Image (cartoon, rainbow, N blue to C red):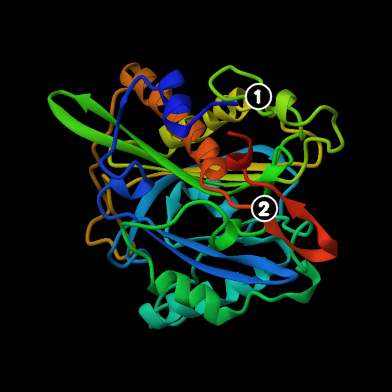
């Protein structure tokens, strides 16, 4: 094919990339993985920490877009209602949502002894994709300690590809996984960052599009898999946006999915979550009123465009960083790099 990742990026890049070209270019955001790779066990956990302080006591504005709701994520309803994020965001496989939720709750209880005693409970966010094509998903191999380790190990630099929650994932008939990217916008003389991280497990196996080029048709001559599986997309920014605006930002992930060849089929759980680190919402308020900064809606168009670009590269980055993996029932998923 003669296509490198840099070639692909040049095809659609309009905005400057962040220093690391990761979601962690947004100040304060950290990401950690635990990868389980042993024969038929091909799974793991990815944890996203939206800021380094106490998330329960200092919440962030957030918004969710359920692009196609064939999914089993936890914690999204309260974000849709209240517009705030108060926990790490966990990515894992479908049948490990319960384990991950319990582990995240235990972590939050240890950090906040007042939860359930002096105040209400906590809304932990766990997202999922089904890695059962490659992983022994029925074995429930993800344990609470794996989730806790992913949270503890979170840092500003992290791996992409067949790692963490993305270990057993499939994208367009190829090895999917974890991908990330970032873009920089200048607003009133100040640089702001939009970052994205995706767990990719979606698409038909001949529909892959890179920079407008339908390369999937050259890799695979016939379709054997419909568009199902799921994709989780998390978008972070330090631009002052409120929850209503962040819902609109999250919705723009749909365009990035379409650019890569997805039509979000009936069996695909495609969910995007966006948060902003610019405002903190204190759990224990000292006043009945709170003032926040926000960008005017009329200035949102470049934010939307940069979001689509960052998410598109994050999706493709999961493929470019992938590796060929053999898992359960002898199933092998090849890396895109084998065809470059």
Which of the labelled discs sits on residue 61, or is there none? none
**Residue at which label 2 appears:** 169
Given residues 223 and 77, the one toward you in this image is 223
Helix, strand or loop at label 1? It is loop
Given residues 24 and 124, the one toward you in this image is 24
Position of 108 with respect to 20 (left or right) is right
Position of 8 with respect to 214 (left or right) is left
Helix, strand or loop at label 2? It is loop
Dot 1 and dot 2 residues touching (CB under 8 Å):
no
Q: Going 43% across and 70% down the picture, which residue do you hit?
A: 151
Q: Is residue 252 visible in this depiction of the protein?
A: yes
Name the quadrant of the C terminus: top right
Q: Position of residue 29 (x, y in %)?
A: 33, 54
Kindly indicate the quadrant of the structure image that contains residue 28: bottom left
Q: Is residue 112 visible in this depiction of the protein?
A: no
Q: Nearer the viewer, mark 1 or mark 2?
A: 1
Q: Position of residue 318 (x, y in %)?
A: 54, 44
Kindly indicate the quadrant of the structure image that contains residue 70: top right
Q: Going 76% across and 29% down the picture, which residue do you hit?
A: 206
User: Within 10 Å of the Cα at label 2, are there few (<14), some (14-19), or many (20+) other Cα atoms?
Assistant: many
**Residue at which label 1 appears:** 215
Q: Position of residue 241 (x, y in %)?
A: 33, 36
Name the quadrant of the N terminus: top right
Residue 67 in the image: above or below residue 82 = above
User: Within 10 Å of the Cα at label 1, are there few (<14), some (14-19), or many (20+) other Cα atoms?
Assistant: some
Q: Position of residue 111 (x, y in %)?
A: 36, 78
Mark 1 and mark 2 lie on one chain; the one further toward the N terminus is 2
């Amino acid at each position: 094919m003669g296509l490198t990742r840099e070639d692909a990026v040049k095809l659609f890049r309009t905005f400057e990339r962040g220093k690391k070209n990761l979601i962690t270019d947004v100040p304060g955001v950290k990401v950690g993985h635990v990868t389980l790779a042993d024969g038929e066990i091909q799974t793991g956990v990815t944890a996203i920490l939206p800021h380094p302080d106490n998330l329960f006591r200092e919440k962030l504005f957030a918004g969710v877009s359920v692009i196609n709701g064939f999914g089993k994520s936890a914690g999204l309803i309260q974000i849709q209602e209240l517009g705030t994020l108060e926990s790490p965001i966990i990515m894992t496989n479908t049948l490990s949502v319960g384990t991950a939720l319990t582990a995240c709750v235990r972590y939050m209880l240890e950090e906040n002894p007042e939860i359930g005693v002096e105040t209400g409970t906590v809304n932990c966010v766990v997202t999922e994709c089904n890695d059962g094509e490659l992983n022994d998903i029925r074995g429930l191999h993800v344990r609470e300690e794996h989730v806790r380790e992913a949270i503890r190990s979170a840092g500003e630099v992290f791996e992409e590809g067949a790692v963490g929650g993305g270990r057993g994932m499939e994208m367009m008939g190829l090895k999917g996984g974890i991908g990330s990217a970032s873009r920089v916008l200048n607003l009133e003389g100040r640089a702001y960052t939009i970052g994205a991280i995706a767990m990719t497990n979606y698409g038909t196996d001949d529909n892959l599009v890179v920079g407008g080029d339908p390369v999937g048709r050259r890799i695979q001559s016939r379709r054997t898999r419909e568009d199902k599986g799921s994709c989780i997309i998390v978008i972070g920014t330090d631009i002052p946006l409120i929850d209503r605006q962040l819902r609109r930002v999250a919705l723009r992930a749909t365009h990035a999915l379409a650019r890569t060849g997805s039509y979000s089929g009936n069996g695909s759980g495609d969910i995007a979550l966006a948060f902003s680190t610019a405002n903190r919402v204190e759990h224990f308020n000292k006043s009945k009123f709170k003032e926040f900064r926000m960008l005017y809606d009329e200035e949102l168009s470049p934010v939307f465009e940069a979001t689509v670009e960052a998410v598109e590269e994050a999706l493709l980055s999961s493929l470019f960083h992938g590796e060929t993996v053999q898992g359960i029932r002898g199933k092998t998923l090849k890396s895109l790099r084998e065809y470059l």
